[in-house]
Image: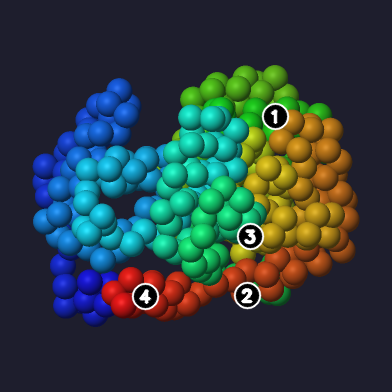
Amino acid sequence: MLRQLIDGSGQFRISWISRFLSLPLWILDRFADDWVRGSLIAARCVAFRPQIIHVAEFQNAGYAYLKARKLTSAARRPKLVLTPYGSDIYWFRQFPKHLQKVEDLLSHGFVLSSESRRDELLAIEHGFRGIVGPRIPASGTMKAQDLAAESKPRNVIAVKGYQNKWGQAILALKALEQVREEISHFEIEVFSCNRSTVKYGLRMANRTGLVLKLHKKGALSHSEMESLMRRSIAMIALSKSDGVPASLLEAMANGAVPIQSDSSCANEWIENGKTGFLVPYDDVNLVVSSLRQILSDQEFTAKAREANSLAIGKSITPEAALQFAFATYDLAAS
């Protein structure tokens, strides 16, 4: 099926019922402990007889699969390919109810393809005994821009705007308030804003006189995000938990020096203090000192951009990911 879809000789269609009912079914399953979607997956496994099933993200897809597994005979259970995203293991393992499900899912895994070495080790620690595949960022790969011929000054500071149980955008904005005089000639562009980030940002602009542009979640296309990073001298992203954020890779590929919370897997992409900064998500003072070094040390920022561009260029290619998918299919079929 994979090869057929790539060759353009096959079709995979989702029924109109599934498209329109996916959200109501998900809401219902919040109360039914994933039995509704699990039953649908089990029925499809019986009818379609897949050789592999790919769980991309644990808390929704993975938990529904566990219910389906209980409703499917051993002879009809496909081999399981697991792709944990940023917080699937790292964050949820601290909650006993989630940890039990995560470990159950990992114990049935045939192949694991995670974003990071961190998640590979966590998966093995919590019961995975299958084949470890290549690391592939959930956002895909980035192509590094040619930064050698830059002529326009970078007059923007980019900020990731998530403010929720993980994202801590308001702490990033509070850090910028502490250096408001030093960044008075910069624009601050906040992307993927939650409502609380927008409210705080508007009050901050009135209070400080700084120029803020607030983009709600989903407002910027991928090309617009790349343009933002090419205009930015730095990108600040703080969260309690993360994997390999797309914004980190976009910043690296387009020359914005990252200031990223150390609760992510950014340490596998940037070297702290040399190609960017890894900070505790709640250490406002360290965010301030990191930003000051980026603003004041042109030699540092130039070297960081060059090194990050090289790091992006060595990341896994889509072709390698596709070859891995084919190899997985062949192993499952054998």
Q: Amino acid at mark 2?
A: Lys
Identify the image quadrant of the N terminus.
bottom left
What is the distance, in whole Å, between disc 4 and disc 1 at their CAs?
47 Å
Left or right placement of residue 123 versus residue 270 in this view: left
- Mark 4, secondary structure of its residue: helix
User: Marks 3 and 4: which is nearer the front?
Assistant: 4
User: Marks 2 and 4: which is nearer the front?
Assistant: 4
Left or right placement of residue 194 versus residue 117 in this view: left
- Mark 2, secondary structure of its residue: loop
Is residue 197 visible to the viewer in this orientation of the structure? yes
Q: Earlier in the sequence, mark 4 or mark 1?
A: 1
Work out whether residue 223 or residue 101 is closer to the camera in this orientation and state it. Answer: 101
Residue lying at 57% horizontally and 48% vertically, measured from the top left = 126
The numbered dot on residue 331 is 4
Residue 132 higher or lower than 185, as above or below: below
Residue lying at 34% horizontally and 43% vertically, measured from the top left = 66
What is the distance, in whole Å, between disc 3 and disc 4 at their CAs?
23 Å
Residue lying at 83% horizontally and 38% vertically, measured from the top left = 286
Q: Which residue is mark 1?
A: 171
Q: Which residue is mark 2?
A: 314
Disc 4 and disc 1 in contact, CB within 8 angstroms: no
Residue 25 in the image: state x and y as whole percent: 22, 33
Q: Which residue is mark 3?
A: 117
Left or right placement of residue 314 versus residue 267 in this view: left
